[in-house]
Amino acid sequence: MIDLKSARQFVIPGLLLLGGMVNVSDLAAQTASEKKIVSTSKQITPDKCVPVASWIIPGKGETTLSSVLTSVKDKSVVLLGEMHANPEHHRWQLQMLATLYAARPDMVIGFEMFPRRVQKILDQWVAGELTESEFLARSEWQSVWNTDANLYLPLFHFARMNRIPMRALNIDIALRRAVTSKGFDGVPEKDREGVTRPAPPTPEYLEFLLPIYVQHDRPAHKSTGKAQKPNVYDPDFLRFVVSQQLWDRAMAQEIHMTLSSYDKNKNPLVVGIMGSGHILKGFGVPHQLEDLGVKKIAALLPWDTNRSCKPLVEGYADAVFGLMPFTSVSAAPLQQRLGIGFEFSKKTGGALVLQVEKRSIAESAGLQAGDVILEMAGNTPQESSDVIAAVKRQAPGTWLPLKVLREGVIIEIIAKFPPLVK
């Protein structure tokens, strides 16, 4: 049995090392992690605990939209969760934005999807100065977030239509990589984008993250070559936890700074659009907001009716809304994806690979973080959009030859795009 009573002391100043920014926003809602959570409520059939189009207060029972709105009328922050690739979740978010805006028109919408450095682009979009394609290109959507923009565009257009300020909540990939290699204290304060040391996690958060961490491929034990069963004191697990906390802290700080910019006599509402894993049970962004002195927070989450009811205990969220599970009607992906995070580097003359997704085409091809893509199908990319276009042109079942610079040596790699399954 793991003693978690002393676990909150593990975040030592010198231990703030990031082990790769793994986004648990979606994983947090998955069945595998739910197996660790024991419900104290009555046993309920999975598809009955949150009926479609109904509101539930976890651990208490049914409620109404009117009651939900009454409960958030004096809040400073309302966090709306999502599974990033689920269209139903984004439709629900749009509905909630419209509803909240009708009640609280002095609104700001913060997005996890944008790093702070593109804030000017968000301002220009809301002001009507950019076309849709210009906005996505200049905000580097494909390289920064790399999820189908059509899922989010209705939210962006809602903000623009009503001239609601949009705030970029996230940090840059470069900062994550710097902290990963040098540690939090190894990165000069001027390069931290204003992010301060995260508040220590609660023992419950550590217990919650551990089964999620286990789902990831972990470095093999150096002495035996075998992966070891981790516990909350495992150094690699601690890096995993702190990587999530840095993400949460950055978003919480941006929300806090937005609220602080208002006159104290005003009562603005900041709505945060982010993955549910950053919100549920108050572990992530709410925990960091409270540490910063922001106490009036509401967490509203979508709930797919095919989910297990076990996690739906008191404290999971202020309220959840039932949605039909999303089922794609097309066997084809919304867009071709290589599965890399990258930034275009004029210094290296190509696309610098920052991260490679697990089980992606890039991983199968052998691409590695630190590689520089110099050519794609014989063409030299001149900017980020060239890389994105080359991937989008690939038809299912075709191969994309890449010329890659790795540790001073040029090698050739073939990215194989699988055929459609009929």
Image: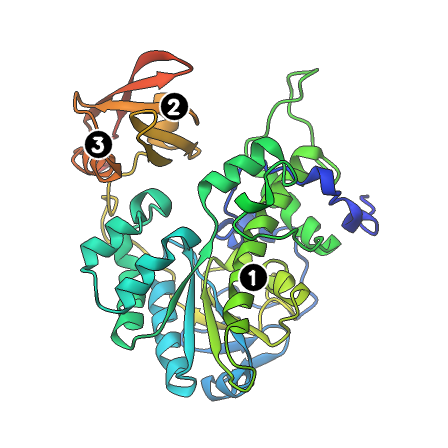
User: What's the amino acid at mark 1?
Assistant: Ala
Answer with mark 2 or mark 3, whichever residue precedes in sequence: 2
The residue to which callout 1 is attached is 252
Q: Are marks 2 and 3 in contact (CB under 8 Å)?
A: no
Residue at horizontal 42 percent and vertical 77 percent from the top: 107
Residue that appears at 38% across and 21% down: 366
- Residue tagged by mark 3? 382
> On the rendered image, what quadrant is the C terminus found in?
top left
- CA–CA distance in space, label 2 to label 3: 16 Å
> Residue 129 vs residue 18: left or right?
left
Instruction: Report x, y in % for residue 242.
Output: 63, 45
**Type of the residue with mark 3:** Gln
**Please, is residue 45 above or below residue 413 in the view?**
below
Pick whichever, 324 or 289, lies toward us: 289
Labels 1 and 3: the sequence-earlier one:
1
Disc assigned to residue 93: none
Taking 320 as reference, is 106 left or right? left
Question: What amino acid does circle 2 point to?
Answer: Asp
- The dot on residue 371 is 2
N-terminal of the two: label 2 or label 1?
1
Q: Is residue 339 visible?
A: no
